[in-house]
Each structure stands twice: as C-alpha cells, then as structure tokens.
Amino acid sequence: MFDPRIEVFSTCPPSSGADARTYLRDVVRVARWSEEAGCRGILVYSDNSLVDPWLVAQVIIEGTRSLCPLVAVQPVYMHPYSVARMAASLGHLYGRRIYLNMVAGGFKNDLTALNDTTPHDRRYHRLIEYTTIIQRLLSGASAVDFQGEFYRVDKLKLSPSHPPDLLPGIFISGSSEAGSAAARAIGATAIEYPKPAEDYRERPAADGGAHGIRVGIITRAAEKDAWDLARARFPEDRRGQLAHQLAMKVSDSVWHGQLSQLDAGGETGPYWLVPFQNYKTMCPYLVGSYERVASELGRYASLGYRAFILDVPREPDELHHASVAFDRALDRCLSHSQTG
C-alpha cells in the first residue's frame, strides 16, 4: 500500500489503439488494481483522439469504492460551468471526490482543428480564469460574477451545489514559467516531467506551493530483473522514434522539449527515457532495484515533491513493487529530516 504521506495516482489506459470490445473492462481492472494498491486516484487523459474523459471517470467511480478520477480538463472542449456542474453532479450522485488536471493543450494540430490559435503562455492566462470560475462555483458561492479577458459570467449559480467536503484537488502542468505561475495563482499542484534528481541545482518546490511529478516505475528486488522487464516492455522501435520526432514538431509544450533534450540515461542509472523517445509513453521512467529506485524517489521527495502520477500499470503487482520503493524512499527521507 502506498504511504499516506504522499499522493500517488496511477493512469487509466487510453482508448486510442484499444479494443473497443474490451476497453471498459480494462479500465475497471486497472482502476481496481490502483485502489487495492492504495492509490489516491487515477489520471484520465483527454485529447482529440480519445473518448470523453468524464464518461470514463463515471465508469471508474462505479467500478471502485474510493478511487478518485483525475480528469484532464481542456478549456476548448467545454465551458467552465459545465466542468463545475459535472464535478458537482458526480459528487451528488456518488459521494466521490474527483481531481481536475487542468490542461493548456500542447499539440498544435489539435488546437488548430478547433480554431484555437491562442499562444502557449496566453493559454495559461486563460486557464487561470477558467479554473477560478470553476473554483468559485464549487466553493458554494450563491452566485458568481467574473469579468476577465477570456470569460465573463453574471450571477451564475450552480445546481446541484457541490458537497463542501468533496472539493476537487487541482493539478496543472508546472514545467514552464507560465505553468508555474498559473499553479501559484489558482493554488494548484504543479506537476512536472522531471529531470534526473541530481540535475536540480535548487529546490523546485521551494515556492511554498504543492508540487508533483509524472513518472513511470519498473522496479524489482534485483536490478537485473527490473531491467530485463523494462527492455522487454519497451524495446527500441524505429517507427516509434519517427512518431516521437513528428510529435515534437507539432507540440509547443515546454516539457516535451525539455525531455527531448535530455540524454536517455542508458542503463547506468535509474532514470530512463527510452520509452518516451520511442513514443511508447509520455513520461520518463525509473528502472532498477528497490534500493536504486528508492534512492531516486527519496531525492525527489527531499526536493519537496509530494504528488506522483505513475504510468499505466501493465500487471496487478506492478503498483505493489512501486510501493516498496516508495516506502523505502520515504523512510529514508523522513529519518534524514529528523536527524538533519
């Protein structure tokens, strides 16, 4: 079970490339693995190629007892009132808290198809207004007035009202300056696609806000067993490498560029970018023995990161192995802080 001192989220299988006949069954299966492992919630992706994340979130809620969907929210898809009403409706119907992953949008082709030409940093300004309206509606305000550059509402009321004990947690990408500023403005957890922990020259989480990272983990008791599994799961793939290069050309996400400029790390340390570079995942991986992965996780924890969004688990025991590394990392980090 994951330690309650941190928030750990898994990731829901994406619908793109999945078998429509078995997709919902796979979603529920992964959600139940995540709940049994003690995850706080599960990320549900959203982009132009995927099924609606709110419908997937409802399936997750109905298939689990307490797992919280972390729903990706893209402003160009729906008005902020619709997001607030959806969160309130799920709270009213199921008594379940959700989290919102506020997405500025990184693939320019998706945005162009929707006639959204807003520049990268301005999309974060828009996201601040968007999220502010959602937060005010969900906070129980009798009526919301807002006059901004992108959104205006006049005496807007939310019905059904949202249960006050189920207010959603808010996440947002914090890899860019604009994203970090937006996180501070709306009180969100800033999620980064991290560099190797040793590359940080200062504490990224020193601004007083909440911070987290998105990372995959493959770990076993023996170093060789972890790497054998990692190589078998993510072999070199020339077609995937070409797809990755094309994706980088049509993305203006800062984190895409940052990861693409880093060295793959080979197999000398736990930090591994081969899955990302072969277009199999959208995050770096930590690979190795419990001790090696725990050491890297401990460094991130000592930098102030307390939320961790893991990649899609392939097997039910994968999250258990990750929890072993997290426990060792946190025990080490906690004992160090007590003696330091």
Image (cartoon, rainbow, N blue to C red):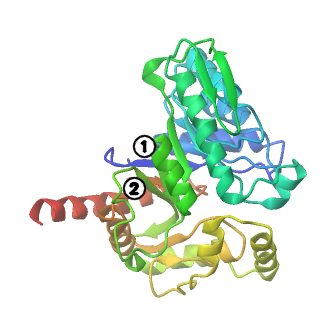
CB under 8 Å between callouts 2 and 1?
Answer: yes
| Residue position for label 2 | 323
Q: CA distance from mark 2 to mark 1?
A: 9 Å
Front position in the image: 293 or 315: 293
Instruction: Name which quarter of the figure residue 199 lies in.
Output: bottom left
Determine if residue 30 is in view: no
User: What residue do we see at 63% from left, 51% from top?
Assistant: 124
Q: Secondary structure at mark 1?
A: loop
Q: Is residue 183 left or right of residue 301?
A: right
Q: Amino acid at mark 1?
A: Gly
Q: Position of residue 259 (x, y in %)?
A: 60, 74
Mark 1 = which residue?
38
Picture layout, residue 317 above or below residue 96 = below
Q: Residue at x 88, y 49 (%)?
A: 115
Badge 1: residue crowd in 10 Å (few <14, some 14–19, many ≥20):
many
Image coordinates of residue 171 in percent, x first then y, are 53, 46
Q: Position of residue 3 (x, y in %)?
A: 33, 48
Residue 64, labelled with which disc?
none
Left or right of 179: which side holds 59?
right
Residue 42 shows in the view: yes
Q: Is residue 312 left or right of residue 163?
A: right
The residue furthest left is: 339
Q: Quadrant of residue 260?
A: bottom right
Lower sequence index among marks 2 and 1: 1
Question: Is residue 123 placed above or below 339 in the rendered structure?
Answer: above
* Amino acid type, label 2: Ser
- Does 90 appear above or below 42? above
Q: Give the left or right position of residue 300, taking residue 24 as reference.
A: left
Residue closest to the eye, 254 or 280: 254
Q: Secondary structure at mark 2?
A: helix
Q: Position of residue 156 (x, y in %)?
A: 65, 17
Mark 2 residue crowding within 10 angstroms, few (<14) / some (14–19) / many (20+): many
